[in-house]
Image: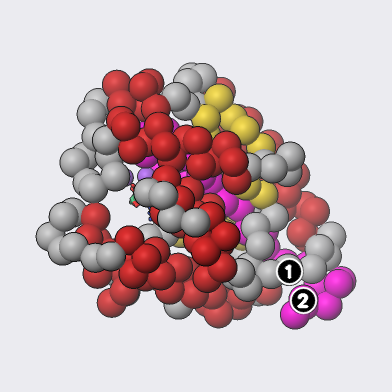
Amino acid sequence: CISSKWDPRGALIVFEGLDRCGKTSQCSRLLSSLERLGHSVESWRFPDRDTGVGQMISSYLSNQSQLDDHAIHLLFSANRWEKRSLMEAKLKSGTTLIVDRYAYSGVAFSSAKGLDIEWCKAPELGLWAPDLVVYLDISPEKAAERGGYGGERYEQLEFQRKVAQSYRALSDASWKVVDATLPIGVIEAQLREMAVDCISTCQEGKSLSE
Ligand code: DGP
Ligand code: NA
Ligand code: NA
């Protein structure tokens, strides 16, 4: 724990789910509504494809390069580590971060390939722990029906079924599971309420944890 118990700070709000669950558009809606409410907030996503490591990940995802499953796992993790100190600075300065995918994606996608789950978790240890994890829940079949996948490496029904199983194994009672098949506006309202609650808890001085 690096911050005094009483420091008000921004909240770390993480969104997880299968590809095509609607996370990305819900993150941008949430960003706008929190901004309208006057919160200091930024929207982030992992992988962050703009860094050097992120470019290697992007090339792997678009099948332009091949990498050992362990090696790519460590690159995804490194991509989160390279943003850790900026994340800390933002949170401590009172900015809330809405994050589209985080360490849970790392573990869910790599363990879906058959890598040992404990091995997958190890490089993620020490990243900032989210204050709220929202799982946008959709069946792999329904997700696949949504306007087709973009054609990246993991966007295949069989693999997404395995990812769904991995997420189930990873999730705990603290996760907020939201039905991703509800109307967009209904989901948006649910997420806004969860986020506002979470932000006020952090403003009351919840300490950052690893
Ligand atoms: P996105 O930009 O959210 O569409 O993510 C790109 C793809 O990479 C998507 O299929 C999810 C997957 N992914 C995201 N984070 C990780 C990670 O840390 N490890 C692995 N293996 N896959 C990830
Ligand atoms: Na994707
Ligand atoms: Na996405």
Task: Name the spot of residue 172 as percent of width and height, x first.
Answer: 69, 42
Q: Which residues are magenta?
A: 1-27
Image quarter for residue 69?
bottom left
Quadrant containing the C terminus in the rendered view: bottom right
For label 2, being within 8 Å of ligand 1 is answered: no
Secondary element at image label 1: loop
Looking at the image, do the residues carrying marks 2 and 1 touch, with CB atoms under 8 Å apart? yes
Rendered residue at 49%/74% (across/down): 81
Task: Name the spot of residue 100 as percent of width and height, x first.
Answer: 46, 51
Q: Quick one: label 2 or label 1, which is nearer the N terminus?
A: 2
Image quarter for residue 176?
top right
Q: Judge left or right: residue 169 versus residue 43.
A: right
**Gap in angstroms between the C-alphas marked 2 and 1:** 6 Å
Give the labeled residue for mark 1.
208
Rendered residue at 76%/59% (across/down): 202
Quadrant containing the N terminus in the rendered view: bottom right
Image quarter for residue 91?
bottom right
Where is 60 relative to 180, above or below? below
Three-letter code, disc 1: Leu
